[in-house]
Amino acid sequence: SVKGPKGSLSHVLPELITPKKEENSLVLTRASDERAAKSLHGLSRTLVSNMVTGVTTGYSKKIMIVGVGYKVAAKGKDLEFALGYSHPINFTAPAGITFTVETPTDLVVSGVDKQLVGEVVAKIQKLRKADPYKGKGLHLQGARIRRKAGKTGKKA
C-alpha cells in the first residue's frame, strides 16, 4: 500500500517477493533465482515504482481529436463526444480518473493509477478508430499515425 499527496494505491505482492524498508526506500527481494521468481521480481518492482510515481506526481495522457465536426465537451464529470455519428456519445469517468477538456479537440485523461489511465484512454480511442487514409479519429499525443496512400487510379 502506497500513500501520497494525490491519493493511495495498493497491490498484493506474490509469495516469492518480500518487501523490506531500508532507510528512505523500499527494497524488493526474491526468494530464489528461478526464472519465474526473476520475472515476478521485475514486474513487482516496476508496479511498486509506478504506484509511487502515481501518488506523488500522477499520470496523464493527452488525446487529440482530429476530424471535421469531431469534438468533446465536459458534462459534469462525464464527457460527450461528437464523432461523426448520428448521435452524441456519452462517456462516464471511472473512479480515480479526471478529465480536462483544454479545447474542444484536446482532452487530457489523468489519474494516479497508470494502468487505469491507459485503459480509459484505450476505451476512448475505441469510440472512433483512427482512419489511416484521412488521418481522422482519436489520436494519442506523440503517437505516430500510420498513413496509407489512396487508390492511384486506372492505368492505361
Image (tube, helix red, strand yellow):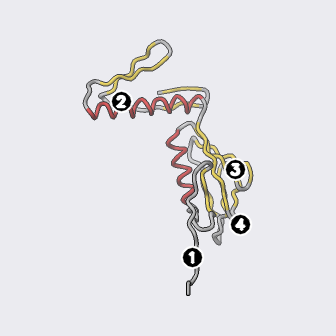
The amino acid type found where label 2 is placed reads His
Seen in the picture, residue 100 relative to 2 is either above or below; the reply is below
Q: Residue 37, percent across and down? A: 29, 31
Q: Nearer the viewer, mark 3 or mark 2?
A: 2
Q: Nearer the viewer, mark 4 or mark 1?
A: 1
Q: Residue 113, percent across and down? A: 53, 38
The amino acid type found where label 4 is placed reads Val
> Mark 4 or 1 closer to N-term?
4
Image quarter in which the C terminus is found:
bottom right
Badge 4: how crowded within 10 Å, few (<14), some, or many (20+)? few
Q: Residue 55, percent across and down? A: 56, 30
Where residue 133 sits, quadrant-wise, is: bottom right
Q: Is residue 71 left or right of residue 3?
A: right
Mark 1 lies on a secondary structure that is: loop
Q: CA distance from mark 4 to mark 2?
A: 48 Å
Determine which of the numbered discs, if any, sits on residue 151 in the image. Answer: 1
> Mark 4 or 2 closer to N-term?
2
Seen in the picture, residue 125 relative to 150 is either above or below; the reply is above
> Mark 3 or 2 closer to N-term?
2
Badge 2: how crowded within 10 Å, few (<14), some, or many (20+)? many
Determine which of the numbered discs, if any, sits on residue 76 in the image. Answer: 3
**Residue sitting at 60 percent across and 55 percent down?**
139
Q: Nearer the viewer, residue 6 or 77?
A: 6
Q: CA distance from mark 3 to mark 4?
A: 25 Å
Q: Identify the residue under disc 2.
A: 41
Q: Nearer the viewer, mark 1 or mark 3?
A: 1
Q: Is residue 4 left or right of residue 19?
A: right
Badge 1: how crowded within 10 Å, few (<14), some, or many (20+)? few
Determine which of the numbered discs, if any, sits on residue 68 in the image. Answer: 4
Mark 3 lies on a secondary structure that is: loop
> Mark 3 or 4 closer to N-term?
4
The amino acid type found where label 3 is placed reads Gly
